[in-house]
Amino acid sequence: MDTREEVRIYIAGRLSEAERVEELLSHHGIEYTVEIQPYTTRLLGVFRREYKGANFYVLSGHGGFCRNLLRKAGLTKGIIDEE
């Protein structure tokens, strides 16, 4: 049984975005897991739309470092700050 705590750091709404996150984390030797989950957004600020996104999780001790990597790479839209 794995008892290591993971934190969600990013949700990618597009495949190309998810691939960029995977490439960045892998390049820096970061272990991560990906889980596909639904998320909602508003179209024109009014109409609720549901999509499926790739949620990226890393060990809790790596969360801040990974978020900074993502920001520096311009992947800011899907960053999940500490929950």
Image (spheres, rainbow, N blue to C red):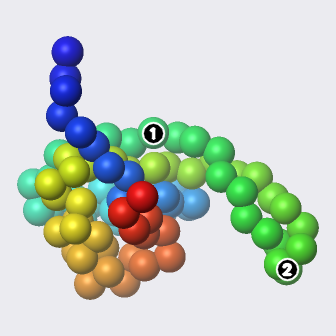
Say the numbered circle drawn on residue 44.
2
Q: Residue at x 52, y 40 (%)?
A: 36
Q: Work out which residue is located at the far left of the displayed protein and give it.
A: 29
- x then y, percent, for residue 8: 38, 52
Is residue 73 visible to the viewer in this orientation of the structure? no
Q: Quadrant of residue 66?
A: bottom left
Q: Residues within 10 Å of mark 2 (few under 14, many from 20)?
A: few
Q: Is residue 18 left or right of residue 3?
A: right
Give x and y (percent) for residue 11.
Answer: 48, 58
Task: Reply above or below: 15 against 78.
Answer: above
Q: Amino acid at mark 2?
A: Leu
Q: Is residue 64 visible?
A: yes
Q: Are marks 2 and 1 in contact (CB under 8 Å)?
A: no
Residue furthest top as drawn: 1
Label 1 element class: strand
Please determine whether, in this image, residue 41 is positioned above or below residue 51.
below
Image: 49 above or below 6: below
Sequence order check, earlier mark of 2 and 1? 1
Q: Is residue 79 left or right of residue 62?
A: right
Q: Residue at x 83, y 78 (%)?
A: 45
Foreground residue, 49 or 5? 5
- Describe the element under mark 2 as helix, strand or loop: loop
Picture coordinates of residue 67, whole percent (x, y): 28, 70
Three-letter code, disc 1? Glu
The residue wearing badge 1 is: 35
Category of crowding for the residue at label 1, using alpha-carbon neighbours closer than 10 angstroms: few (below 14), some (14–19), many (at least 20): few
Residue drawn 39% across the image and 42% down it = 34
Distance from the alpha carbon under mark 2 to that under mark 1: 27 Å
Please indicate whether residue 55 sits to the left or right of residue 45 in the image: left
In the displayed structure image, the side of residue 37 where residue 45 appears, left or right: right
The quadrant in which the N terminus is found is top left
